[in-house]
Image: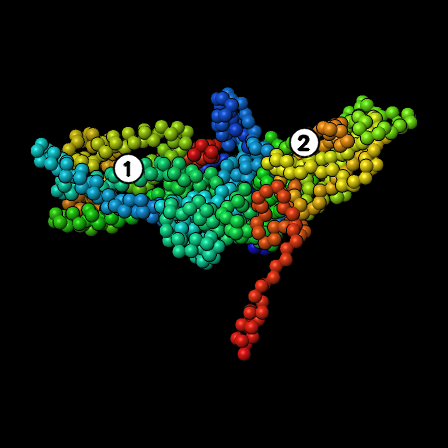
Amino acid sequence: MSAPSKLPVIHVRPERGAGVLSPLEVWRFRALLWQMTVRNFQSRVVISPLSLVWGFIRPDIMTLAFVYLRQISGADFGTEVPYALYIFSGFCLWFLFQDTAIQVAGSLAADAGVSQKVYFPKILSPLAIVLSRWVDVLIIALAVLALQLAMGVPVGPAFVYLLPAVATLLLLAFALGVLFAGLMIYHPDNRKFLETLLYLGLFLSPVLFSKKILPEVAQDFYLFNPMVGILSAIRGSMFAPETIDFLAWQVAAGFSVLLSCLGLFVLAGAARNNAEKI
Amino acid sequence: MRAAKLASKAPPPVTNESQLIAVDVRGLSKRYRLSSGATDLSPTGSAKKPKKAGRDFWALKDVSFTLNRGERLAIIGHNGAGKSTLLKLLSRVINPTSGEAFLHGRATSLLEVGTGFNPNLSGRQNIYMNAALHGMSRAEIDTKMKAIIDFSEIGQFVEEPVKTYSTGMRSRLGFSVAAHIDPDILMLDEVLSVGDASFQQKCLSRMDDLTGNGRTLIFVSHSMDSVSRFCDRAIWLDKGRVRADGDVMAVSAEYSKSTGVKSSIASGANRRKPDTTQPTKFLPAGAVGEAELISAKVVNSAHKTSTVGKLSDKVGIAFEYAVFAPAIYVPTIALYGPDSRLLFWSVPSKNILDNYRLAVGEYSATVWIPGNFLNVGRYSVSLGLVGPDHSPMERYFLSEKALSFQMIEPLDGAASARGILPRDFPGPLRPLSEWDMQRLDEHVALQTSSTKRA
């Protein structure tokens, strides 16, 4: 035991503001954050050994279906790279985004059994989900790169932007998930709303088509869909023929940061006042 | 008690006095709002008043106390008294509505054994997760890993998924992790009853180690026996408020009274009194007498009324009665065990009839149940006065289960029938029996050892 004068002091009091999400607390519990990240990854692999490759098997199936539909319809989706590569990358990223957001939203409920018995900063649960998804990012990147090289699409110098672009995608998924994690504490039905929103988002985002097929006026407004900038940044950093829309990416990054703040604010309030409801 | 709301945000200044304080609780309160129906609890953790109309329920109200370093505090009370709420607040699992508390040192709470176990992961993987939850770093876990596995006795199964473990194995693993936490302040909520008998003994020994060495303990329990074993001070919570705070034996005794333990009874001031002015004329055996109970009480070895008795001490049942007609009277008691089953009847053992031939007047009788005879638990007593010279036997009065008392076994170093075994002995009796043990083949053993030496 330490000397009395050097002992840490824990102050128990009614929480106000975003105190429950203090970065200092996260730092203090960094060992637990790491363990939760490892646990999330390990439990996924143990329960479903194929869960890692599922990240590109599902997009594979969807890609086959949409490529066939395009062939029989003869539609032009305005892509600079082969359509199969375009939508394969789109589906991979969309499913990564969608699964992460849903898991983050449900992370507090998943850890409820623990959080009602042991104290730890509530933000650790969603953070651990996002951190554990980086393994999926690596696998997806390798799968897309393999298809890209097989189709003869070169990798350009913008490759250096890949990491921050993927980070923006995960930040947006975190922000949306955290917002709904907070809302779900008040009303569990918000999960259905999130799922519907994400399903709709698949068709409103440039996953299946390029924004170039839209009228110019619409393209300006389209920037406000954060997935436009993020998908453009990731595809542009991987496929040489595609260009990064930096303005759209900046909008997306700014939006993700703002949404994160809003999400954390909502989560802090919900966790502060409804700890027992989680 | 101090005011419920205190504005101060900074910890109290460090002085020589405050360096001795481990836990400082100031007006801690927790409010829930009953939104609809009596059982629907809607928590309102913030200090703000709830916006919607609803009835407030204070699970904890204005609780204040300080705990010095090395003190071992028991929190006792009925179900719903606020014991677990207090522990959850101090553990920061939930937020207080008002008030504050300062915990000086590394604090760990054990509200449940095996919290956070993932059934799909191996024992080893779960040790990492569970230990991290209790604030251990990766390096610390690696250092203690072997000790944790050894203590849990799960051996080679540590690499198997926890879902393949028996309930006992899971509990042992959970407790083993908990047993290797090294906090300054340890908060426990009824987590000691895990595993089989021999593992329980290990747990209890480990708890003794943990709660020794100047560590501060806060222990919530319904078991007066556990409380008296681990704690030297107790707080009795009643409807969210502190009802008593003090020495564990004194508070336990007070609490026992509230749980229906009745250590004394007495008839009212207007009771009928025997007329002792008339000369007594003894009648031959078979005369019908008349008597009433005046009072009765459970007493300890110091002849003081007590609701709680130590296993090693004798317990007395003292009662007074009024005799209104000369006859033969034999006082008697019946003792019932914790399961309400009759254990024995007892009457005075002298077999001289004149000892029981009583004139009109008031009498007392005390029967002593020897120490190291009963087990831990609650016992009740029936009292009676009978006339054995009648057939069927005359009952002048019989007061069924009029008194009760709680037997506990504090760690006071007294000789104990439990030997080296855990104390949860089955059955209502636990006599300190005399045992003789010796080796039968001692000459063979001696020969073997001397041959080896040669």
For residue B54, above or below residue B246: above
Name the residue nearer the viewer: B412 or A183: B412
Residue A128 in percent (x, y) is at 37, 44
Q: Residues within 10 Å of mark 1 (few under 14, many from 20)?
A: many
Which is more foreground, mark 2 or mark 1?
2
x, y percent for residue A183: 39, 31
Say which residue label 1 marks: A98
Residue plotted at (57% across, 71% down): B446
In the image, A249: left or right of B51?
left
Closer-to-camera residue (B247/B255): B255
- Give the residue type that dot 2 points to: Lys
Q: Do the dots labelled 2 and 1 sit on one chain?
A: no
Q: Is residue B441 left or right of residue A158?
A: right
Towards the viewer: B385 or B328: B328
Q: Amino acid at mark 1?
A: Gln
Q: Chain of mark 1?
A: A
Task: Report in which chain the residue with disc 2 lies.
Answer: B
Total numbered labels: 2
Local crowd size for mark 2, using a 10 Å CA cut-off: few (<14), some (14–19), many (≥20): some
Identify the image's colour scheme: rainbow, by chain, secondary structure or one colour: rainbow
Question: Dividing the image into 4 quarters, which one contains the N terminus of chain B?
Answer: top right
The kind of secondary structure element at disc 1 is helix
The location of residue A270, given as percent across then percent down, is 44, 33
Write down the residue under mark 2.
Answer: B401
Instruction: Give the Cα distance between marks 2 and 1.
Output: 68 Å
Identify the residue shown where x is 91% and y is 25%: B278
- Secondary structure at badge 2 equals strand
Residue B183 appears in view? no
